[in-house]
Image (cartoon, rainbow, N blue to C red):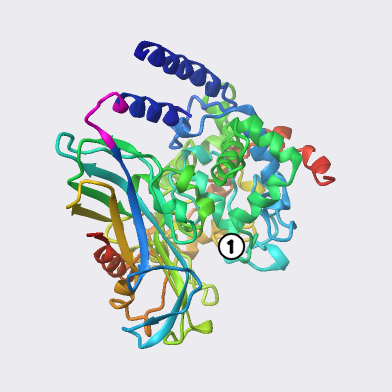
Amino acid sequence: MKKILLLLVIAVSAQLRADMRPVRVEFQLKFNNETLQLGKKYYSNTLKDSISFETLKFYISRVIVNGELHSGAPFSPEAFLIDAENPKSQILQNSFYLDSVLGISFLLGVDSMANVSGAMGGDLDPMFGMYWAWQSGYINFKLEGYTNSCPSPKHQFQYHIGGYLPPYASSRALNFEVENTGNVVVEFDVEKLISQLNIQEQYEVMGPGNAAMDISKKVASVFKIKE
Amino acid sequence: MKIRVVLLVFLSFLIFSFYTGGIGEIYFPKHFPKPEYSFSSNPINSKAVALGRMLFYDPILSKNNSISCASCHSPYNSFAHSDHALSHGIFDSMGDRNAPALFNLAWQKSFMWDGAINHLDVQALAPITNAKEMAESLVGVIEKLRKKEMYRTAFFAAFNDTVITGEYVLKALSQFQLTLISANAKFDRVALGKEQFTHQEKKGYKLFLKHCNSCHTQPLFSNYQFKNNGLPLDSVLMDFGRGAITQKGSDSMLFKVPSLRNLSFTAPYMHDGRFKKLGDVMAHYNSGILSNNMVSKELKKPLKLNADDRVDLIAFLLTLNDKEFVFDPKHQYPKEILSASKD
């Protein structure tokens, strides 16, 4: 309630400035430049095999868009859960006002503070299946699906990437310059991640550790700004 | 215009802050240290405590509505699981550890024998989702709760919101568990100058301070750190405790030091419940500790107490039993659940 009121005040006061215009941030999830559809069979050039996805969800937090006059405009202190199943989640809802857009920075995952603060609400509610039960901590990135290249039961692969304690803190800070001055569109092409993974041998990563650290870096490398 | 908006916002803030302030149901014993729990992010109110108590005793938290928190955390055992070395859950599945007693949770930094859980709020997720315990999901629990009029009413009363969320389920469970404060044993009455130890208890207290207090630190009777107390590894369970969580060799075979409060109610003892009686525990510390370099430094030297000393020490340990806490009707089964099972 308090937060909504605060946002209202920010929104109202921002609107009063004539030189400001609304900024929208959108995440586009893709497979080989095509909009990703869960359950659909794709052909992966890397695997030379078909592949389908059941889940793609990840947290984005500490989103800051940099404009010319204003160095940063944080959306909200909380995290956003981007979910391939829910198109609404891919457009960050709290729009705000800036003079221009020169860059964007965000954290892939949830920051360490949120990991030790108990039960949280909104997108951070543990009911969304992005919180480990057996050991405290958020899952920053979740990718699940099927491919015959995977020797596991049902040929399933599951990557639950998380961990907040050093040396296995797996959230990744990303920073991009933005060419256009309109809306910010961040692309995530899953094929570009699959091409970096060794899905035939490492198809189940479900806890903090070296594997999660390695994959989190690869996940971070896939994000790019739409030209 | 601007002034009006500011005024409106200010007024709403004012009203809101009064609304959630509430009157705490929690007391902090004078002789206890500062609690660890962040009460500001989950302000105690009596409606949320009552809701948490209902949830704690309601088997609705399990997949087939058969197991509640109280199945393994019985109030009459100081919220531990009596008679069972390893606690059992849904479909009589045998768990891997002995369910620990629940009290003074606001003073603990981590939960579980291996400290895998970093906050009381998220502790309940582990038993709810564990295949051998409740085998349910948080979403599954929420779906069931949303269908019950009684819970819709109780959640609204507790959190002033028409939607039941995972955050509220977990926070309500925390609220009830935070009221489980054990601070009225004979030891506490002596500490507050209301009563006196007997001659024998006094002798036992001296021995306790010398041999036990470094880990089972008064007045909580644990420092809640992780130690290796020289138990041989169970070759079937292969439980490496803290080491499995931190993936550090130096943490292998470390388990959290349990509080000694209410020890007569919480048998069997140790993370795997291997000791049935207090005497077995005493025998272990007196002469049963393995001698290797993994054993924590506090236990490198065997106790070697004589029979008289052992009796005196036990006499003191019995002053840590808090009967008022164990039999407190406020912590027991809430009758509201019975009426709920009808709708």
A99 vs B147, left or right, is: left
Considering every residue shown, the one lying at the far left of the view is A68
Reading the image, the residue beneath label 1 is B130
Residue at 19% in and 54% down: A176
Q: Position of residue B177 (x, y in %)?
A: 59, 40
**Amino acid at the residue labelled 1:** Asn
Q: Is residue B36 visible?
A: yes
Foreground pick, B113 / B294: B113
Work out whether A211 lies above or below B101: below
- Locate residue A212, reporting x and y percent: 33, 67
Quarter residue B338 falls in: top right
Taking depth in this image into account, of A130 and A135 the one nearest to the observer is A130
Report if residue B83 lies within the magenta region.
Answer: no
Local crowd size for mark 1, using a 10 Å CA cut-off: few (<14), some (14–19), many (≥20): some
* Residue drawn at x 66%, y 51% as measured from the top left: B143
Image coords of residue B334 (percent x, y): 75, 38
Q: Is residue A85 above or below residue B7?
A: below
Q: Which residues are magenta?
A: A14-21
